Amino acid sequence: MSPWSPVGSVEWGGQPLLRRCADLAARHRAVLHGTVSGVRQWRSPAGWPVTDAVLDDGTGDIVVRWIGRSTVPGVEPGTALAVEGTVADVRGVLVIVNPLYELTSPAAHRARRSVGTRRPDGS
């Protein structure tokens, strides 16, 4: 997540900080915690790899999109995920593109550590 702490904050850049999928609106900053209910990989018309994950927080869901990523290690159905980003309306679907994110379940943390997270010194 960003170094700015959303804890206790109610706005970001003069707009309300959204914390539930049920409250989402385009062009607003959101900090959401939920469970990934589905993942899809596809190619954009320009040929870029794209990974979409559907994040469900119990009040609704949103598409979390990583452009330029054919996979996002640890992001799979059932993964607990926290995301921070600006909500966009893409052809009538609310999407957060290239968010700051954190895997929040123990199993997801194990998966993330096992995929290329070693330090340059090999540790």
Image: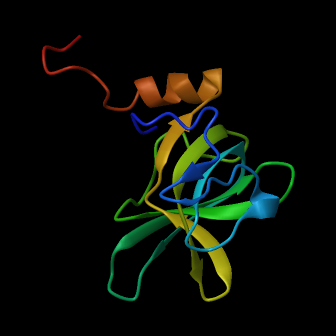
Q: Is residue 116 above or below residue 56?
A: above
The residue that appears at 56% across and 34% down in the rendered structure is: 103
* In the image: residue 123, left or right of residue 30: left
Residue lying at the far left in this picture: please name it. 121
Residue 65 vs residue 113, the one in the foreground? 65
Residue 43 position in % (x across, y down): 43, 77
Residue farthest front in this picture: 14
Count all numbered tags in the image, as a single digit: 0
| Residue farthest along the top direction in this orientation | 123
User: 29 above or below 84?
Assistant: below
Location of the C terminus by quadrant is: top left
Residue 65 screen position, x and y as percent: 51, 64
In-image side of 40 versus 38 (left or right):
left
Left or right? Give the position of 59 relative to 33: right
What residue do we see at 21% from left, 20% from top?
Answer: 119
| Quadrant assignment, res 22 | bottom right
Q: Farthest residue to the right: give it.
A: 59
Q: Residue at x 53, y 49 (%)?
A: 84
How is colour applied across the structure in the image? rainbow
Question: Which of 98 and 108 lies nearest the eye of the viewer?
Answer: 98
- Location of residue 15 (image quadrant): bottom right
The residue nearer to you, when weighing 68 against 21, is: 21
> Residue 68 location in percent, x, y?
34, 65
| Position in image of residue 92 (x %, y %) | 67, 86
Q: Is residue 12 above or below residue 65?
A: above
Above-or-below relation of 89 to 4: below
